[in-house]
Amino acid sequence: MKRVFSGVQPTGNIHIGNYLGALKQFVQLQEENDAIYCIVDMHSITVPQDPKVLRQHILDVAALYMAVGLDPKKSIIFVQSDVPGHAELSWILTCNSYTGELSRMTQFKQKSKGKESAPTGLFTYPILMAADILLYDADIVPVGNDQKQHIELTRDIAIRINNKYGETFVVPEGQFVKSGARVMALDDPTSKMSKSAENPHSRISLLDEPSKIKKSIMKATTDSEGVIRFDIENKPGISNLLSIYSAFSGLSIEELEKKYDSQGYGTLKKDLVEITVDALAPIQARYREIRDSQELLDALKDGGQRANAIAEKTMKRVKDRFGLGL
Ligand code: TYM
C-alpha cells in the first residue's frame, strides 16, 4: 500500500478547479492506498484571516471533503494545526533550504510582486508544505498543476537531507490528472481559476446554486471563431470549457469535439451547465447533511489523533538523525 498525502487551504470558495484537480483524485486514491488528507489552516494564515471566519472555513472544507466522498473510515482527515509536528519539522527543513530556491517559486513571485517587503510566511510557505508531506512519509501527492514546483522543492529538500544525514525521508511524487489539473478562470482563460479572484463569475464554487452556475458558464469568455475545438493557445476559453466538460463527464476531448462538430458555443455552454449542476447536486446535498454534525467533529478529532501518532514517529526519527534533544 502506498501512502497518499494532500491538503487544501480553508479559505472559502472551494471551486471546481480544486475539485477536478485535487479532491476528485483524493476520493479515488483512498480506495487502494493509505490516504491522509489535511485542512492546512496554518498555510492560510500566510495572509491575514478573520479568526472567526477561519474556524468556519476549516469546518466548511472538512464537510466538503466528506461531501465529495472522502470516508473517515478509509482516509485520515484532520486539521494541520492539531498536529504540532508540522511546525516542528518545518523549522528543521527551513535550516536545510536556501533563500535562492524559495525566491524562484512562482507563487511567491506572484504574491509578492511590486512589494518592497513581503510577509515571511509567504516566502517560507513551500517549506511548511514540504513538512506536511515529509512528516507522513508520503509516496504520492495528488495536486493540481499549480503545485508542481512546490512538490519539486519538497523532493529536493528530502534528497538533500537524505544525502547529508542518511535515509530520513521518503521522496514523494506529485500526481496530476489528465483533464482538470489546471482549470482556468471563466472570465479570463489565461489565468487559473482561483478562490480569491474578485469576480465571482470567474469561478464555479462547489456550493454555487444552479442559477449562479448557469450565469457564470453562459458569460464565460470564448472567441469569435465559432468552431468547437481544443486549442489552448488560440482558443483558451473553449479549450477550458471542453476540459471541464471532459473531467465531469468522462468523455474524452476528441469525443466532445465530434459531438459538437458544427454546433454553436451556446449549445456547448448549455450542456455544460447541465452537466456541472448534476455533478454538484449530490455533493451539495451531502454537504448540507454533514456540515453541522457531530459526525464531522468526531472524524476530525479521530483523524487528528491518528495523524499525530504517525507524525510523532517521524519526528523521533528526524530528531535522532539531527542529534536534537536527548
Ligand atoms: P489550494 O488550497 O490552493 O488548492 C487545493 C488543491 O486544488 C488545486 N487547484 C487547482 N487544480 C486545478 N485547477 C485550478 N484552477 C486549481 N486551483 C487549485 C491545487 O493544486 C491543490 O491541489 N499549497 C496547497 C495546499 C497544501 C498542500 C500541502 C497540498 C499545503 N500543504 C501538502 C499537497 C500537499 C494549496 O495552496 O492548495
Image (cartoon, helix red, strand yellow):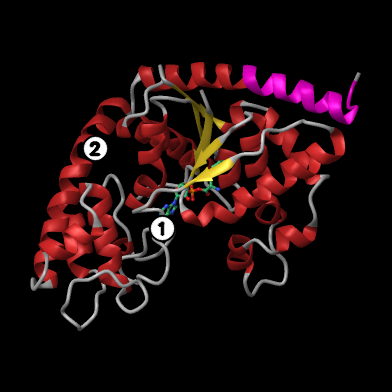
Span colored in magenta: 309-325
Depth order, front residue of 287/20? 20
User: Vertical placement of 282 versus 180: above or below?
Assistant: above
Question: Is residue 215 shown to the viewer in this render?
Answer: no
Q: CA distance from mark 2 to mark 1?
A: 23 Å
| Element type at mark 1 | loop
| Element type at mark 2 | helix
- Give x and y (percent) for residue 121: 68, 51
Q: Amino acid at mark 1?
A: Arg
Q: Main secondary structure of the magenta part?
A: helix
Q: Is residue 20 left or right of residue 162?
A: left
Residue extending farthest to the bottom is: 224
Task: Say which mark, if any, is on residue 182.
Answer: 1
Q: Is residue 210 left or right of residue 310?
A: left
Q: Amino acid at mark 2?
A: Gln
- Give x and y (percent) for residue 160: 79, 44
Which residue in the protein does label 2 denote?
Answer: 284
